Image (spheres, rainbow, N blue to C red):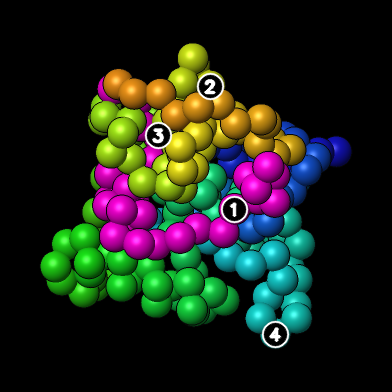
Amino acid sequence: MTLQNRVLPTGEIAAIPARGLFTGNRGIIHRPDGTLGTSRWSHKHWLVCTLTHPKGTYHGPMPDRGWSALFFLDEAVALTAGHRPCHYCRREAYLAWIAAWEGATGAKPERMAMDSALHKARVTRTRDQVRHEAALDGLPDGSFVLWDGWAHLVQGNALLPHTPEGYEAAIPRPSGTVTVLTPKPTVAALTAGYAPVLHPSAQG
């Protein structure tokens, strides 16, 4: 059975066989049989983690009484879904994230306050993704927008159409106001220099 554990840039969690480059943690949100209930998080600390535990252990995707492993095509998708780098298994990325957050806000963040700010900017109480409008010309690489009703990654002078298996051929980056899927605080961190790890298909 393909488990419902693949997170898309539009916020949905789908049953897709391909796993991607990263896993992530929002707490325990699955039933004993490995299926998801109605909850989409059990705490505000949404993390982007490595596929393998730093000590070499692996607890399985949906273990009994263990955190529910979610999967992302790449880090840009994970950030758009509202996650941030794990301070344990991705320490270097976390420190780069903190530096970018500080560059964007002018103050080094406290972890609980940062995760609370991200939570307000990524999802509503009814589990809907928070989206906002912005000028496409001003968005940083690594952010996601809706273009023609489809999630696209902003990358240089192009937009890359997202699919669960990878990015499709780039289209020229247009101008105008678009719907942004990436949370505002994350867009600010990307603008301040945080560079997410991208799927190889983003390189063309």
Amino acid type shown at disc 3? Leu
Identify the image quadrant of the C terminus.
Answer: top right
Q: Which residue is mark 2?
A: 150
Residue at 65% x, 48% y: name it. Answer: 203
Residue at 67% x, 31% y: name it. Answer: 168
Amino acid type shown at disc 4? Lys
The one nearer the camera, 105 or 16, is 105
Magenta segment: does it hold 153?
A: no
Q: CA distance from mark 1 to mark 4?
A: 24 Å
Q: Magenta segment, which residues?
A: 177-204
Residue at 51% x, 49% y: name it. Answer: 76
Q: Earlier in the sequence, mark 4 or mark 3?
A: 4
Please give left or right for residue 9 compared with residue 5 in the image.
left
Identify the secondary structure beneath mark 4: loop
Q: CA distance from mark 2 to mark 3?
A: 11 Å
Q: Which residue is mark 4?
A: 55
Q: Which residue is mark 1?
A: 198
Q: Earlier in the sequence, mark 3 or mark 1?
A: 3
List x then y, in percent, for residue 94.
43, 72
